[in-house]
Image (tube, grey):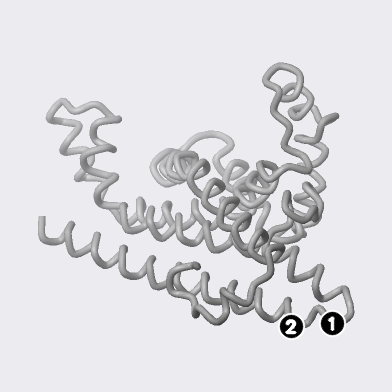
Amino acid sequence: MLDGLPESLTSALTPDEWRAVALSLKVSFWATLVSLPFGVAVAYVLARHEFWGKQALNGLVHLPLILPPVVTGYILLLSFGRKGFVGALLDQYLGIVLAFRWTGAALAAAVMAFPLMVRAIRLAIEAVDPKLEQAASTLGASRAWVFATVTLPLILPGVIAGAILAFAKAMGEFGATITFVSNIPGQTQTLPSAIYSFLQVPGGDAQAARLVLIAVAIALLALILSEWVGRAVARRIAGS
């Protein structure tokens, strides 16, 4: 049973519905975990550095927000499919196949959630007074040490908020995922894909409604957790 969800609801789920829920949680967790270091790095670069091509990088990061998700999924298929220029190399040299695998669903979810993660973290970094970092640098600390001991503790609530936003976005991702990895029950069928499938068959409304309630409950739990952790970290920083 998923903690925090009514037992009557979770006990009514069929094995196929359980697999969709479990796969969505798995995909969202790994999408968030793997993309988080990249999100912090990109947010820091955009917030603290001026360089040629900065606007292009910023536009590229936010492109998934304005492109139709199906277009993003198609680009991923062209790039990371077995015959894609990146996918072919991964398959040939590392034996990694992303298309029509749950790992591909995690990649699609990470790409779609990345802009929200970067934006939340970037706002947190921009709120930190650069003079604090400069003071640490003048004392002989390296840039990496300044970030680890000064910047990161101060932006931790923003990092947590960005991670939770990314997780929630990944849980709800549909268009890019179904385009890139299809809708294979037990393999790539996530929660939104399962809801869509149930709505396409007669009598599937009840199953779809159960999964909708599960999705809403998980989203609310994620929001509550984000608020609680963010406030706890902020209190700890303020008291230190």
Quarter assignment of residue 158: bottom left
- Residue at the (75%, 35%) spot, across then down: 80
What amino acid is at disc 2? Ala
Q: Nearer the viewer, residue 216 or 155?
A: 216
Side of 32 relative to 49 (left or right): right
- Residue at the (54%, 63%) spot, across then down: 168
Mark 1 closeness class: few <14, some 14–19, many ≥20 residues within 10 Å: few
Asked if the residue at tag 1 contacts the one at tag 2, i.e. Cβ–Cβ closer than 8 Å, the answer is yes
- Place of residue 77 in the rendered image (x, y in percent of width and height, measured from the top left): 80, 41
Side of 116 relative to 96 (left or right): left
The alpha-carbon separation of the residues under discs 2 and 1 comes to 7 Å
Q: Nearer the viewer, residue 234 or 168?
A: 168
Q: Nearer the viewer, residue 4 or 144?
A: 4
Q: Quadrant of the C terminus?
A: bottom left
- Residue at the (58%, 37%) spot, across then down: 53
- Residue at the (43%, 74%) spot, across then down: 4
User: Which residue is at the far top?
Assistant: 93
- Place of residue 10 in the rendered image (x, y in percent of width and height, measured from the top left): 56, 74
> What label sits on residue 191 in the rendered view?
none
Q: Nearer the viewer, residue 41 or 136?
A: 41
Q: Which residue is mark 1?
A: 203
Disc 1, SS: loop
For residue 197, above or below residue 179: below
Disc 2, SS: helix
Q: Which residue is mark 2?
A: 206
What amino acid is at disc 1? Gly
